[in-house]
Amino acid sequence: MRSSQTIELKRAPALAALEHVTPGMRLGLGTGSTAKLFVDALGEKVKAGLDVVCVPTSLATEQQARALGIPLTTLDDTPALDLTVDGADEIDPALRLVKGGGGALLREKIVAGASARMIVIADESKRVDVLGRFPLPIEVVRFGAAATALRIERAAEHFGMEGPVRMRMRQTGDGPLLTDGGNLVYDGQFGEIPDPDAFGEALNAIPGVVEHGLFLGMANLALIGTPGGVEEMTR
Ligand SMILES: O=C(CO)[C@H](O)[C@H](O)COP(=O)(O)O
């Protein structure tokens, strides 16, 4: 598929999500190429007079929103949001997600958790029957990271998953990627995750794991860009 076609499959759900935004809303703004298209479109609406206030999920989204003149707040000043719109790396039929391909999983999960509703926007390539095709991002504190990674591998083995857990490096090749919170990201190439709820709990129980990219029971609606139009998935 040509990249211009892929962008259109991302833009259509981004624009469809905008229809769920009403004046006065407190919004969470996601991270990634699809969320970026939503923020661009939201910026146009704000220029035309739409009154919203937003919490970004990354420094990159914050910079983009600021440049577009979108009013920003923080969860400290606005701890309850109406809606978060964000992308995903995988979506299963129960609207369980893998997120964190852009390394923003911790803030994304905090912001989505503070929101009454979460709408996921994605092109159809993100739809899977079973989560796990995309490596699972896991945010880990730097202290003792190798020991934490070993415990993650052991937890995965317990669930019958054997894939390696690799520290994510910067695309420039000069060292490990650090998140906006100053932590490392490990990507678990586990293959199919048979019980995401139990595995998510096992990961949460490992000291040194800050957050994992399984977003379970958080999304209310997914808007999926397909060549035939935007398809809706609900729980
Ligand atoms: O979770 C994310 C960032 O941490 C993104 O939402 C996810 O990686 C999807 O990105 P894109 O829309 O570029 O495919």
Image (cartoon, rainbow, N blue to C red):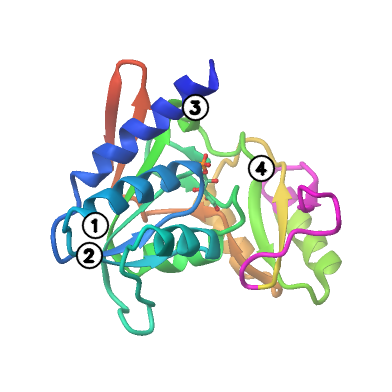
Amino acid under label 4?
Pro
Badge 2 vs badge 3, beta-carbon distance below 8 Å: no
Local crowd size for mark 2, using a 10 Å CA cut-off: few (<14), some (14–19), many (≥20): some
Predominant secondary structure in magenta?
loop
Q: Name the secondary structure under disc 2.
A: loop
Local crowd size for mark 4, using a 10 Å CA cut-off: few (<14), some (14–19), many (≥20): many
Q: Measured from the top left, where is residue 72 in percent x and y? A: 35, 71
Q: Earlier in the sequence, mark 3 or mark 1?
A: 1
Q: Measured from the top left, where is residue 79 in percent x and y? A: 32, 79
Q: Quadrant of residue 60?
A: bottom right
Mark 1, residue position: 46
Q: Measured from the top left, where is residue 226 in percent x and y? A: 36, 22
Residue at screen point 34% across, 51% down? 219
Q: Quadrant of residue 17?
A: top left
Looking at the image, residue 154 sits to the left or right of residue 60; the answer is: right
Q: Earlier in the sequence, mark 3 or mark 4?
A: 3
Q: CA distance from mark 3 to mark 1?
A: 30 Å
Residue at screen point 37% across, 57% down? 68
Comparing labels 2 and 1, the label whose residue is closer to the camera: 1
Badge 2 vs badge 1, beta-carbon distance below 8 Å: yes
Q: What mark, if any, has residue 125 been given in the picture? A: 3
Comparing labels 3 and 4, the label whose residue is closer to the camera: 3
